Image (cartoon, rainbow, N blue to C red):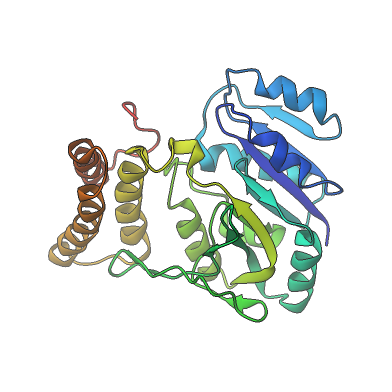
Amino acid sequence: MNLVAVVLNWNGGDDTPAALASLDGCPAICVDNGSTDGSDRAVEEHFPGVELIRTGANLGYAGGNNVGIRRALERGADWVLLLNNDAVAEPGLYDALALAASARPDAGLLACTIVDERGAVQYAGASFNARFGYSGRVRTVPPRGPADVGRADGAALAVSRAAVERAGYLDERLFLYVEDVDWSLRIRAAGFAVVVVPGALVRHQGSAASGGSASTVNLYYDTRNTIVVAEQHAPLPRGLRALRRGIVVGAHLAQAASHPARAAAARAVLAGWRDARAGRLGQRSSA
């Protein structure tokens, strides 16, 4: 398995060195996504073997990772591992991915099994029903071996060169959140499997790029992009389309009701709905 890892340095912070250090022995690229705190210089100083690419601006999850994917493929990678800077690869990750790629030559995405800092499983597979705009419950019990799933989790996944060439890169219009769902659906539609690998463990802090669980950024993008992705992959007549939008908004408003900043969270959800209706994509100017 000729794999190159891509770590996205999200607007600075001190998480990136741990992510890069956990990839010891694996060729790596660090994409600095517009940091302003000097963290790019720290990467350059402490990881001279890591190729550092500075984007000069925050291109979002999709845009920043696409820069890294393109460079990894230029370097001859057959597989590219995307690892969030707030995630750490556990020992044996590379071997587990290599074994899974060999056992499942039909796979285009290999989803890592994600655990939290205490070791509790956060992701061991999930689905997405585009007809209803609904992400099924995340599986928290890993399968015994590599198994088909509906969608990968963007915190840690490996994509094959063949899948990128056939299904394309991450959709940069989405900017942040749900790109992993869209990519999973497109890669499956292109004839590849999305496979979770129980032995490919990654420890993830979660939501650092968008301000953590107290941020309303995730509610805005998740609402907007869930609607956009559902409509792209499962077009419906006008009336049913409006009903699906209502289901997505209602589910996110329910989340907003328990948010520490309830009013701001509800406004973020409604802004996401309005922008989805209007086709306003990319980075939200007020986010």
Give the image location of residue 273, x and y in percent.
22, 46
Answer with the quarter of the image where residue 213 lies: top left
Measured along the vertical axis of the image, is residue 85 above or below residue 198? Answer: above
Q: Quadrant of the C terminus?
A: top left
Q: Is residue 70 at least partly visible in the picture?
A: no
Give the image location of residue 133, x and y in percent.
30, 63
Name of the residue lying farthest toward the front = 118
Q: Quadrant of the N terminus?
A: bottom right
Residue at (39, 33) in percent of width and height: 283
Measured along the vertical axis of the image, is residue 1 above or below residue 45? Answer: below
Q: Is residue 6 left or right of residue 227?
A: right
Give the image location of residue 159, x and y in percent.
66, 58
Residue at (60, 60) in percent of width and height: 119
Give the image location of residue 139, x and y in percent.
48, 72
Measured along the vertical axis of the image, is residue 87 above or below residue 200? Answer: above
Answer with the quarter of the image where residue 248 lies: bottom left
Q: Is residue 116 left or right of residue 207?
A: right
